[in-house]
Amino acid sequence: MRAVVFREHSPSLDAYEVIEDMPVPEIAPDEVLIRVQYAAINRLDNWVRLGWRGLNLDFPHIPCADFSGTIAEVGDVVEGWSAGQRVTANPLLSCGRCRNCLRGLQNRCIHWHILGETVRGACAEYVKMPAENLIAVPNGYDMQKAAAASLVYVTAWHNLMRAGELRAGERVLIVGAGGGVNSAALQIAKLAGAEVLVIASTAQKAEMARAQGADWVHDRSADENWSRAVYQAT
């Protein structure tokens, strides 16, 4: 299959190349094979390309945690999914056997991996995923948008809804308006019925936050004392 890869850690985007002869992933009985329609570059992919001590990759490495596509093949014990379904996925790969996984805390898996980080990712014609990680993409929803959603929205959802137990009517302060996680957090908090306050670093990012529904926005490029501004606003 075709895939975008890099063969060594590098600060340069020129490290990426397209090759034609990567093997199609072989799926386990509880996995599915997905034909990728879109893959999205995440900040994580830049860090992985740069590398860090202790990160041992099987080169050539395929980046990308975020993607969308259609199921091409299902494993023998997979139920509830079939070929042709439109999907994205939670890119956090848990072992399912450690003490945290057995308590339902897969996000704290002792042996966790992230797609595209420590295992080959989705910037290829095909990617395999555990069936339990799949997220159905509704018919009619833009698959390009679905490809950009999974890693940042999973992170923001966990922080706000699971760990933070956010409820309607509560007030949320989001410091930063331009990043993917913060943008996702703003939208999730509004969906939950919260009042959302945002600190932006530029006028452009402030306008973006307002367009996404923020109830109150402070542009710290015009006034650095944002803590005072928040105090006065609340």
Image (cartoon, rainbow, N blue to C red):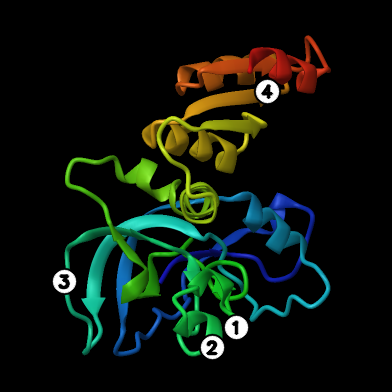
Residue 82, labelled with which disc? 3
Q: Amino acid at mark 4?
A: Ala
Image quadrant holding the C terminus, namely top right
Q: Which of marks 4 and 3 precedes in the sequence?
A: 3
Q: Amino acid at mark 2?
A: Cys
The quadrant where residue 201 appears: top right
Earlier-in-chain disc, 4 versus 2: 2
CA separation in Å, label 4 and label 2: 40 Å
Q: Which residue is mark 1?
A: 111
Q: Badge 3: few (under 14), some or many (20 or more) residues near its Cα, within 10 Å?
A: some
* Pointer 4 residue: 200
Residue 98 disc label:
2
Do the numbered discs 1 and 2 sit on residues whose CB atoms are within 8 Å? yes
Judge from the rendering whether residue 194 lies leftward or rightward of residue 183; answer left or right. left
Check disc 1 and give the amino acid type. His
Number of disc labels? 4
Asked which secondary structure carries label 2, the reply is loop
Q: Position of residue 161 (x, y in %)?
A: 46, 49
Choose the circle earlier in sequence order: 1 or 2. 2
Q: CA distance from mark 1 to mark 2?
A: 8 Å
Marks 3 and 4, Cα distance to the nearest angstrom? 44 Å
Q: Calculate the distance from the C-alpha at mark 3 to the C-alpha at mark 1.
A: 29 Å
Task: Look at 53% across and 26% down and name the residue there.
Answer: 196
In the figure, is residue 199 to the left or right of 168? right
Among numbered discs 2 and 3, the one appearing first in the sequence: 3
Q: Determine the residue located farthest toward the top in the rendered image.
A: 222
